[in-house]
Image (cartoon, helix red, strand yellow):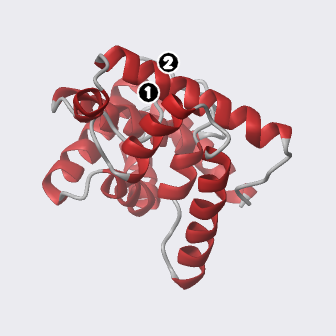
C-alpha cells in the first residue's frame, strides 16, 4: 500500500514539472474508486460523470497553480474535492445531502459508504440497530428530527412542515442530535467502524 501512495506523490510531482502523462496515470488509477464514491451519493450516471470531470478540472487547476501540498495523500485530497462538489450539487438542487458537510463525526456516513455485499449488509443492519438504541438516549425533539431525516429520508423543509418548527430550528436540532450522539458513542466507548 505504501508503494502506491509513494507512486502517487511522484506522479503528482512529475505532472507539476510538466509531464502530462502523469496525470492520466493518476486518473486511471483512481477513477473507479472516485466514480463509485460519487455514484453512491448521486445514483445518476450523467450527473456522476459531470461531477467526476469537475473534480479533475479542480485537481488540474490546483496543481497548475502549484497549490497542492498534501504529498502522499493524493486520493483522500481528490475524494474531498469530489465530496464538496457533491454537496454543491445538492445545495444547487435545494436538497441537502444526507451526510454531514463538516469535519465533525457523522455516524450515518459510515453506514452509507460501506460496500454492500453479504457481510456488508449484516454489518450495516447491525450498525443501524445499534444506532437506533443510541438514538433512544437523545432528547425527544432531537430524536424526532434525526429519525425523520435519516430513517424516513425527509428534507428539512418536510421536517419543518411536519413538526411545526422553522427549517433553522430543525437544522439546529439535527446538529445537536449528531453532537449528542457522538458524545454517547464516546462515553460508552462504542466502536462502529473497523
Q: Position of residue 120 (x, y in %)?
A: 57, 74
Total numbered badges shown on the rendered structure: 2
Residue at image mark 2: 67
Q: Position of residue 21 (x, y in %)?
A: 38, 49
Q: Secondary structure at mark 2?
A: loop
Q: Quadrant of the C terminus?
A: bottom right
Of 128 and 96, nearer the camera is 128
Q: Identify the residue at image location x=70%, y=57%.
A: 193
Asked if one can make out residue 17 in the rendered structure from this viewpoint, the answer is no
Q: Is residue 96 left or right of residue 124?
A: left
Q: Is residue 147 left or right of residue 153?
A: right
Residue that extends furthest to the bottom in the rendered view of this protein: 118
Q: Identify the residue at image location x=38%, y=39%.
A: 82
Residue at image mark 1: 63
Q: Position of residue 13 (x, y in %)?
A: 55, 35
Q: Secondary structure at mark 1?
A: helix
Amino acid at each position: 500500500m505504501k508503494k502506491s501512495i509513494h507512486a502517487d506523490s511522484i506522479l503528482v510531482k512529475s505532472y507539476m514539472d510538466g509531464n502530462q502523462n502523469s496525470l492520466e496515470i493518476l486518473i486511471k488509477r483512481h477513477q473507479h474508486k472516485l466514480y463509485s464514491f460519487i455514484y453512491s451519493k448521486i445514483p445518476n450516471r450523467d450527473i456522476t460523470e459531470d461531477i467526476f470531470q469537475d473534480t479533475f478540472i479542480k485537481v488540474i487547476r490546483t496543481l497548475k497553480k502549484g497549490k497542492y501540498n498534501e504529498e502522499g495523500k493524493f486520493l483522500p485530497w481528490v475524494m474531498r474535492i469530489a465530496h464538496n462538489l457533491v454537496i454543491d450539487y445538492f445545495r444547487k438542487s435545494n436538497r441537502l445531502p444526507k451526510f454531514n458537510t463538516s469535519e465533525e463525526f457523522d455516524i450515518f456516513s459510515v453506514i452509507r459508504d460501506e460496500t454492500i455485499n453479504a457481510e456488508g449488509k449484516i454489518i450495516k443492519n447491525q450498525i443501524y440497530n445499534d444506532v437506533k438504541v443510541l438514538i433512544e438516549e437523545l432528547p425527544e425533539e432531537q430524536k424526532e428530527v434525526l429519525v425523520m431525516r435519516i430513517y424516513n429520508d425527509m428534507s428539512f423543509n418536510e421536517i419543518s412542515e411536519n413538526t411545526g418548527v422553522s427549517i433553522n430550528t430543525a437544522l439546529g436540532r439535527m446538529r445537536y442530535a449528531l453532537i449528542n450522539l457522538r458524545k454517547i458513542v464516546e462515553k460508552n466507548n462504542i466502536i462502529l467502524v473497523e
